[in-house]
Amino acid sequence: MKKIFNLLLIYNIIIITNAYAYLDPGTGSIILQAILGAIAAGVSYCAFYWNKVKNFFKKNNSKKEKNK
């Protein structure tokens, strides 16, 4: 099985053809928007849970201060 896989891999590497594909400027714009959107979503996700963690520890600290 491994021998067949290696032969197919070598065959695919040797027989590479050109795609003749065209990417217009709008496609680059969409890709850029997707990347920036993913970054913004990641940052907002992290910020949301970071606030939850901060509030959890603030509640614990305020309870300890009230008990003293």
Image (spheres, helix red, strand yellow):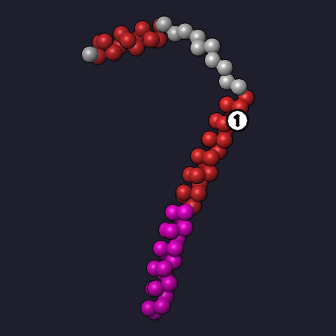
Q: Quadrant of residue 43?
A: bottom right
Q: Is residue 18 above or below residue 49?
A: above
Q: Nearer the viewer, residue 39 or 31?
A: 31
Question: Circle 1: is it few (<14), some (14-19), or many (20+) Cα within 10 Å?
Answer: few
Q: What secondary structure prevails in the magenta region?
A: helix
Placement of 21 over or under 64, stated as above or below = above
Please tell me which residue is depicted at 46% across the width and 92% down the height of the picture. Answer: 68
- Farthest residue in the right direction? 25
Q: Quadrant of residue 31?
A: top right
Q: Is residue 55 magenta?
A: yes
Q: Quadrant of residue 3?
A: top left
Question: Which quadrant is the N terminus positioned in?
Answer: top left
Query: What span is colored magenta in the figure?
Result: 48-68
Q: Position of residue 49 (x, y in %)?
A: 51, 63
Q: Nearer the viewer, residue 42 or 3?
A: 42
- For label 1, the residue is 29
Residue 47 locus on image (x, y percent): 57, 61
Q: Residue at x 47, y 11 (%)?
A: 13
Residue 23 in the figure: left or right of residue 18: right
**Residue at the image position 70 percent from the left and 35 percent from the top:** 29
Q: Residue at x 65, y 45 (%)?
A: 36
What element does badge 1 sit on?
Answer: helix
In the displayed orientation, state which residue is furthest to the left. Answer: 1
Query: At which x and y percent is residue 7?
Result: 36, 10
15 is higher (above) or lower (below) than 32: above
Amino acid, disc 1: Ser
Query: In screen coordinates, is 33 left or right of 54?
Result: right
Q: Is residue 22 magenta?
A: no
Tag count: 1
In the drawing, does residue 4 fall left or right of residue 66? left
